[in-house]
Image (tube, rainbow, N blue to C red):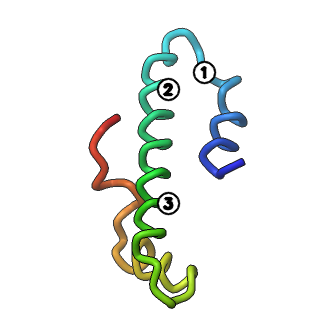
């Protein structure tokens, strides 16, 4: 189970009828961002450590993961 899937499972019970459509949109965006991150990490497949890749990509840039993604 990925972190996104876990978060979805943990928070689904908090969704109301009024917030359902927004929740569906956010859920799909999160899954699309996660997919993009996995593909990017695979395509960058150099010999650096995964932690170094994460730090250079997400920590130092101060850009939240997936912020550059198009809406799903």
Label 3 or label 2, whichever lies nearer to me, is 3
Residue 8 x/y as whole percent:
63, 36
Q: Are marks 1 and 3 in contact (CB under 8 Å)?
A: no
Query: Label 1 belongs to which residue?
Result: 15
The foreground one among 50 and 64 is: 50
Residue 14 x/y as whole percent:
66, 25
Q: Are marks 2 and 1 in contact (CB under 8 Å)?
A: yes
The residues tagged by marks 3 and 2 sit, at their Cα atoms, a distance apart of 23 Å
Q: Disc 2 or 1, which lies upstream in sequence?
A: 1
Query: Label 2 belongs to which residue?
Result: 23
- For residue 38, the mark is 3
Quadrant of the snapshot with the C terminus: top left
The foreground one among 1 and 8 is: 1
The residues tagged by marks 1 and 3 sit, at their Cα atoms, a distance apart of 27 Å
Mark 3 is surrounded, within 10 Å at the Cα level, by few (under 14), some (14 to 19) or many (20 or more) other residues, namely few
Q: Residue at x 45, y 85 (%)?
A: 46
Vertical placement of 26 versus 54: above or below?
above
Q: Disc 1 or 3, which lies upstream in sequence?
A: 1
Mark 2 is surrounded, within 10 Å at the Cα level, by few (under 14), some (14 to 19) or many (20 or more) other residues, namely some
Q: Residue at x 46, y 78 (%)?
A: 45
Label 1 or label 3, whichever lies nearer to me, is 3
Q: Disc 3 or 2, which lies upstream in sequence?
A: 2
Residue 12 x/y as whole percent:
66, 27
Label 1 sits on a secondary structure element that is loop
Q: Residue at x 66, y 33 (%)?
A: 11
The residues tagged by marks 2 and 1 sit, at their Cα atoms, a distance apart of 7 Å
Q: Residue at x 48, y 69 (%)?
A: 42
Side of 10 where 32 appears, left or right = left
Residue 27 x/y as whole percent:
50, 34
Mark 1 is surrounded, within 10 Å at the Cα level, by few (under 14), some (14 to 19) or many (20 or more) other residues, namely few
Side of 63 where 17 appears, left or right = right
Label 2 sits on a secondary structure element that is helix
């Amino acid at each position: 189970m990925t972190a996104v899937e876990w978060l979805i499972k943990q928070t689904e019970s908090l969704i109301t009828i009024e917030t359902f459509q927004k929740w569906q949109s956010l859920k799909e965006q999160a899954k699309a961002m996660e997919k993009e991150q996995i593909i990017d990490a695979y395509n960058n497949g150099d010999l650096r450590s995964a932690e170094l890749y994460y730090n250079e990509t997400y920590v130092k840039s101060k850009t939240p993961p997936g912020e550059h993604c198009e809406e799903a």
